[in-house]
Image (spheres, coloured by chain):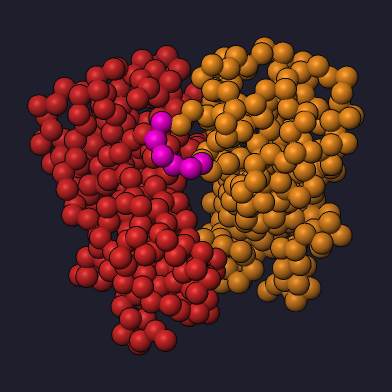
Chain colours: A red, B orange
């Protein structure tokens, strides 16, 4: 039987302020929790149904976890998602550590991506294309938001995010001579663009306003995904995938 | 003041059965309604706030519409979305008309795409890449579902969908000798694939199960988007965009 204190603690972690206070976040559902166990995140405790515990007994024992058995009903009451009926973990958040592209490496940068579903999708897409570093503006949605974690489908365990003031960030990395490639409506055709083997930064902007003026001044290459029909824009998650797909065709890992 | 009958009618159109019975559907929000007015859809009536009516007076008059002025509160009560506070239209659905690829044309096919957000995204992506025909399995989500219409951001007015039994469909078009390209985990690399100038069909499968066995037997080319990291899969909307982007680089309009 879950204690009231534990229920209160888990619910508090849905709010950014309390995630920062406790340096902890919630991971829901079998796929995401199994990927979490397979990562280097420090785990506080895991709530499991009896069924889940039996099915994954060997994995759960191997990790020497603080386990508590609960009913599917208790889990559903706690989770943010209806489908969360097998397990829930609370893990420590990671330090907000500085990231920059190594020589030959491509890194993503997000200027105020606000929608949790979009951020989760971008993390999943980054993981698919072998991108492990994302630098985000301070107003970009928190990676530990439960909706972001859910949309990232486990990829949040393999992709690192660093939240910072982007203008200051560019000052810090001005010795780095790699290109800064921004996705702009009206930029040069992506199909004509040659991604340098040197690596660099690929910037995606806010859902409504694109890349802000403050950040735009640091962009060395303004690129647009060619349009053949009449849709006004592409979703930022979709645009990220197309930018990275074109990059990887030229600069494979 | 909205009549009870009209409120009841609009609410009924959130359900597929009533959309089919009345051959009508709901379009919400300024962007989608303006695109609807710019299309060949037959419009039953439009509810507008006074503010919207003044802002778009010339457009609304030009179309000789059955207009009713309502309050933002009345609109919010009716809509499926919190942001719908300026206008709502009811339009006639289009006939479920047969579609096949012309010579040199690429067409999409969807085998049981169930998530409304995914279908809307696919319609928007198709519109971006100049694809105007999508053939869907009968279990693919209804294009006139309000969540699909919202996610398609107006592109539903330019892309035609035909719902049918896909196995029977392939029998009907067996005289057409164009390639049938399917996205499969484990297929040949998309980066090696040459999209023929003849045009053809690009098939995307269900979110969990991919392309079904019944449909798979008609596929002439099994293609996979190359993976460089560890994510298990890509969202079907993302995968559609990458497949179409690679096609258009080789076969522009």
A128 vs A193: above or below = below
Would residue B149 be found to the left or right of residue B142 on screen? Answer: left
B103 vs A47: above or below = above
- Residue at 24% across, 37% down: A215
User: Where residue A112 sits: x, y (%)?
Assistant: 31, 47
In this view, the residue farthest toward the top is: B197
Magenta span includes A164: no
Would residue A253 be found to the left or right of residue B166 on screen? Answer: left
Q: Work out whether residue A240 can be spotted.
A: no
Query: Who is closer to the viewer here, B60 or B100?
Result: B100
Would residue A115 be found to the left or right of residue B30 on screen? Answer: left
Residues rendered magenta in the picture = B228-233
Q: Magenta part mainly helix, strand or loop?
A: loop
- Residue at 55% across, 66% down: A83
Residue B121: quadrant of the picture: top right
Query: Who is closer to the viewer here, A72 or B236?
Result: A72
User: Where residue B34 sits: x, y (%)?
Assistant: 62, 46
User: Where residue B72 sits: x, y (%)?
Assistant: 55, 67
Quadrant in which the N terminus of chain A appears: bottom left
B198 vs B117: above or below = above
Query: Who is closer to the viewer here, B211 or B239?
Result: B211
- Residue at 37% across, 22% down: A252
Q: Work out whether residue A233 can be spotted.
A: yes
Residue A219: quadrant of the picture: top left
User: Where residue A141 sits: x, y (%)?
Assistant: 33, 54
- Residue at 38% across, 77% down: A68
Magenta span includes B230: yes
Quadrant in which the C terminus of chain A appears: top left
Would residue B84 be found to the left or right of residue A223 on screen? Answer: right
């Amino acid at each position: 039987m879950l204690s009231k204190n534990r229920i209160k603690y888990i619910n508090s972690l849905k709010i950014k302020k309390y995630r920062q206070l406790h340096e902890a976040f919630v991971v829901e559902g079998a796929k995401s929790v199994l990927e979490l166990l397979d990562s280097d995140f420090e785990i506080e405790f895991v709530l499991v149904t009896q069924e889940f515990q039996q099915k994954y007994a060997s994995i759960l024992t191997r990790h020497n976890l603080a386990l508590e058995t609960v009913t599917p009903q208790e889990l559903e009451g706690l989770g943010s998602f209806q489908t969360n009926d097998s397990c829930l973990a609370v893990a420590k958040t990671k330090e907000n550590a500085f990231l920059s592209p190594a020589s030959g490496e491509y890194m993503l940068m997000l200027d105020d991506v606000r929608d949790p579903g979009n951020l989760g999708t971008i993390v999943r897409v980054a993981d698919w294309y072998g991108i492990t570093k994302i630098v985000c503006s301070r107003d970009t949605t928190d990676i530990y938001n439960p909706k972001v974690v859910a949309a990232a489908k486990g990829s949040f365990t393999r992709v690192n995010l660093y939240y910072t003031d982007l203008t200051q960030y560019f000052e810090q990395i001005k010795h780095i001579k790699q290109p800064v490639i921004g996705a702009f409506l009206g930029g040069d055709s992506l199909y004509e663009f040659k991604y340098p083997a040197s690596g660099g930064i690929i910037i995606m902007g806010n859902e409504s306003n694109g890349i802000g003026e403050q950040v735009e001044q640091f962009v060395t290459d303004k690129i647009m995904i060619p349009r053949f029909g009449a849709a006004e824009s592409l979703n930022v998650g979709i645009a990220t995938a197309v930018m990275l797909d074109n990059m990887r065709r030229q600069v494979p890992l």
